[in-house]
Amino acid sequence: MWKFGEIKGDKVIWAVVILLSLFSLLAVYSSTGTLAYKYQGGNTEYYMLKHLIISLLGLFFMYLTHRIRYVYFSPVFQIALWISIPLLLLTLVFGLNLNEAKRVLPLPFNLTFQTSDLAKLTLIMYLARMLTKKQDHIKDFKSAFVPLMIPVLLVVFLVLPANFSTAAMIFATSIVLLFIGRVNLKYIFSLMGLGVVALAIFILILMQLPEDRQGRLWTWKNRIENFTHDTGDNFQVQQAEIAIAGGKIFGKMPGNSTQRNFLPHPYSDFIFAIIVEEYGLVGGAFIVLLYLILLFRAVVIVTKMPQSFGAFLSIGVAFSLVFQAMVNMGVTVGLLPVTGQPLPLVSMGGTSIWFTSLSIGIILSVSKEIARKEKEHESETLQNVAASN
């Protein structure tokens, strides 16, 4: 039995989560003023309180998750993966439009469920489990690579029509996991080539359809053209760059953002611009540092549990979250084309925050198990020393 309120796991990761959550609360409150006047009659506390409740629930889910031994999640998430695949299909057909694409299913209390979040987490869990089981013959194509490849391709190509950036990040995370799991490089490069060819075929098929049935094709094309040719039509990035330039070194201080009134989605996709505007280069660099610390702590877990389920799981989840954060910040500063990816644990959201919290809870669960084993090993060593004396 464990006592409620007892927090275990990597204390550094807990500190990172708390700091990101605090930044999130301040940034969301600052960036939702226009939204509040537009939809809530000027009640500027509405969105902050809603975000606070969602974040606290996320921390509660994280706490519950970290108290459960991570190995118990494996069978549950294996089933959840095969549930998420038909849910992705359901979303493509009946989902609600979000940023001109069917990405979410409706939930009560005006919340939405982004099925790709479930698919991403369950796929990482599946790959971690299979990589662990297949280590004795991991270089074999038929018995090891094929069972790993099929779910990756299924999930990626079901997410792709509505959300190219999420599909690309799921694919990249899978490739990283396969590499860490010692899969034959020849097969990994083959999978990457297959993905590029399949994407090209998918785009060619879309181009043959009537314009009203081409889905997100022209959105992708416009975003890439705006990024590569600087057409001047990328209003979002222009406003984000103005916000960043206005922040200078130490920022305008909390609540003093001016670009929140002009920047589309300042509370989600471009919340990093608001943070830099109000907290300056120092604040922006601190946010980047927090994500890098999270990734570093996951790498430490890998070094302590090499080629194990916990190691693959931790690095897969951490890489996915940090990669998404870097993509979000890269878009904000103009290094990448617009993707629509939120900043994990910081952007205003619903189920996306909860899935991020579950993900970090799993990493904490693994770190807790490491600490327990280290403590047991230390205790055994002391007993052996005492017995020898």
Image (cartoon, helix red, strand yellow):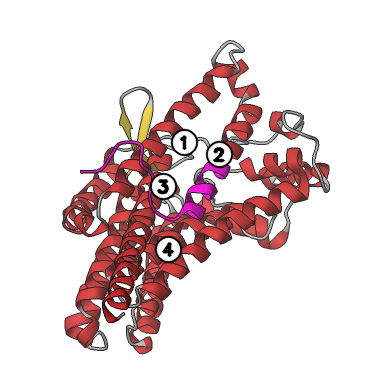
Residue 203 marker: 4
The image shows residue 183 at horizontal and vertical percentages of 32, 83
The image shows residue 362 at horizontal and vertical percentages of 34, 54
> Is residue 14 inside the magenta stretch?
yes
Per the model, the C-alpha gap separating discs 4 and 1 is 30 Å
Disc 3 and disc 4 in contact, CB within 8 angstroms: no
Residue visible at 34% across and 83% down in the picture: 182
Disc 1 and disc 3 in contact, CB within 8 angstroms: no
Per the model, the C-alpha gap separating discs 2 and 3 is 15 Å
Foreground residue among 302 and 139: 302
**Residue holding disc 1:** 349
**Residue holding disc 2:** 268
Regarding residue 341, the answer to whether it shows in the image is: no
Residue visible at 22% across and 71% down in the picture: 130
Frontmost of labels 1 and 3 is 3
**Residue holding disc 3:** 356
Foreground residue among 211 and 145: 145
Frontmost of labels 4 and 2 is 2
